[in-house]
Amino acid sequence: MTELRIGHGYDVHRLVPGRPLILGGVEIPWEKGLLGHSDADVLTHAVMDALCGASKLGDIGKLFPDTDPRYAGISSLELLRQVASLLAEGGWTVVNIDATLLAQAPKVGPFRREMESKLAAALKIPPDRVNVKATTEEGLGFTGDGSGMAAHAVALLEKL
Ligand code: MG
């Protein structure tokens, strides 16, 4: 019988000048970037945490501690590839992922397809299994005033 598992991920990073803005593995031209130990790709981090949650791998803080110098400045897509390997070892297949970026600016609509393709490629699944969307929070809170970005993701896994 097919076993199904769902997972949720949530992440936040601060926006600061002098850093590239990487979202879903895509560098987006913007006056600020996300601060973090890795490339601080908040969207990919939420996706990884959803996958970790569904597969009972814990969370990305446990898998890739931010005190470990191996992960300094690392591409989060590389970390996602490592999560994909762990999922495969456990016999899990990704059914689909739905991720939402919370950001006041910039508009990421033009980059959505590329983000979906990069996330799907890292997971070795077809791009139609990954959905990326974005919303503002109407100028409210830390996403609204541009001091940070947040992301949510859900993932469904199956084991045959
Ligand atoms: Mg993070």
Image (spheres, helix red, strand yellow):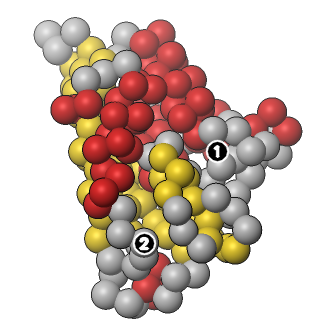
Ranked by sequence position, the earlier of labels 2 and 1 is: 1
Residue density around tag 2, few if under 14, some if 14–19, many if 20 or more, within 10 Å: few
Asked if 127 appears above or below 124 in the picture, the reply is: below
Q: Give the amino acid at mark 2.
A: Pro
Instruction: Residue 4: give x, y in percent of width and height.
Output: 22, 26
Asked if 133 appears above or below 78 in the picture, the reply is: below
Q: Residue 134 is drawn in which quadrant? A: bottom left
Q: Report the number of numbered marks.
A: 2
Mark in front: 2 vs 1:
2
Instruction: Residue 130: give x, y in percent of width and height.
Output: 26, 38
The answer to whether mark 2 is within 8 Å of ligand 1 is: no
Distance between the Cα atoms at labels 2 and 1? 27 Å
Q: Give the amino acid at mark 1.
A: Gly
> Is residue 137 shown left or right of residue 59?
left
Quadrant location of the N terminus in the rendered image: top left
* SS of the residue under disc 1: helix
Quadrant location of the C terminus in the rendered image: top left
> Is residue 154 shown left or right of residue 22?
left
For the residue pair 110 and 155, the one nearer the viewer reads as 110
Tell me the number on the disc at residue 106.
Answer: 2
Residue density around tag 1, few if under 14, some if 14–19, many if 20 or more, within 10 Å: few
Query: Which residue bears the numbered disc 1?
Result: 61
